[in-house]
Amino acid sequence: MNAEEIKLIEACKKQDPVAQKHLYEMYAPKMLAICRRYMGSEEAAEDVFHDGFVKVLTKIDSFKGNSSIFTWMRTIMVHTALNALRASVVSKKSSEDNMEILNETQTDEDIFSGFTAKELLKAIESLPDLYRTIFNMREVEGYEYCEIADSMNMTESYARVCLARAKNMLRKKIEGHFEY
């Protein structure tokens, strides 16, 4: 962290509204983008972002500087999105169904090359909430399956199944040029 960031964080800890506004303006676009990846609609992403930012401001005293402020804020945004999604997660399928899907899963070849980031984001955003969340956690944020399972209150094998389903859905959407 540089000296300016340290000053900004210290001012936010003292609840300085000018510093809070500056922190918001500095990180809002990146944090909102993170929320968009997890939530199905712009409205839901904005709600999660605002809830997450309130948590940032109310918990700023707990920021110790062990990581960057961006990393700390991102973690709060991801957990806020997960909590919002957890409230609406659908029930799990039977384990036989899960194994059938795993067996059908193709290997991870680079089927995404040749598509713009905007096209890929559109395809990812169209995934069902659970699949989109697990895809983002694993493929974008780099979480391990055990972390995903703990966060989503599921087994590791079910997290793997959901990721496989998400990838299969993305393949079909991309192969059909997003006509679904």
Image (tube, rainbow, N blue to C red):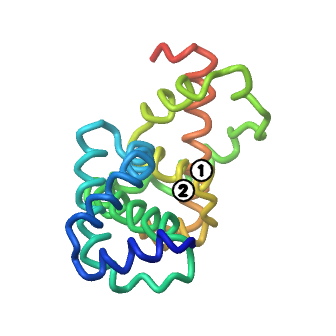
**Residue shown at 66%/47% (left/top)?**
102
Residue where numbered disc 2 is placed: 137
Res 120 quadrant in image:
top right
Amino acid bearing label 2:
Met
Q: Which of 165/67 is in front?
A: 67
Q: Which mark is residue 159?
A: none
Q: Considering the numbered disc 2 on the image, is that residue within a helix, a strand or a loop?
A: helix
Q: Is residue 125 shown left or right of residue 143?
A: left
Q: Relative to 66, is 82 above or below?
A: above
Distance of label 2 from label 1 (alpha carbons): 6 Å
Q: Which of 135/118 is in front?
A: 118
**Residue shown at 61%/34% (left/top)?**
168
Q: Relative to 96, is 122 above or below?
A: above
**Residue shown at 35%/57% (left/top)?**
81
Q: Residue 60: x percent and y percent? A: 33, 78
Q: Which of 71/169 is in front?
A: 71
Q: Classify mark 2: residues with Cα within 10 Å, few (<14), some (14-19) or many (20+).
A: many
Amino acid bearing label 1:
Val
Work out which quarter of the rendered image holds the N terminus and state it: bottom right
Q: Is residue 98 shown left or right of residue 81?
A: right
**Residue shown at 57%/14% (left/top)?**
177
Residue where numbered disc 1 is placed: 140
Q: Residue 93: x percent and y percent? A: 44, 52
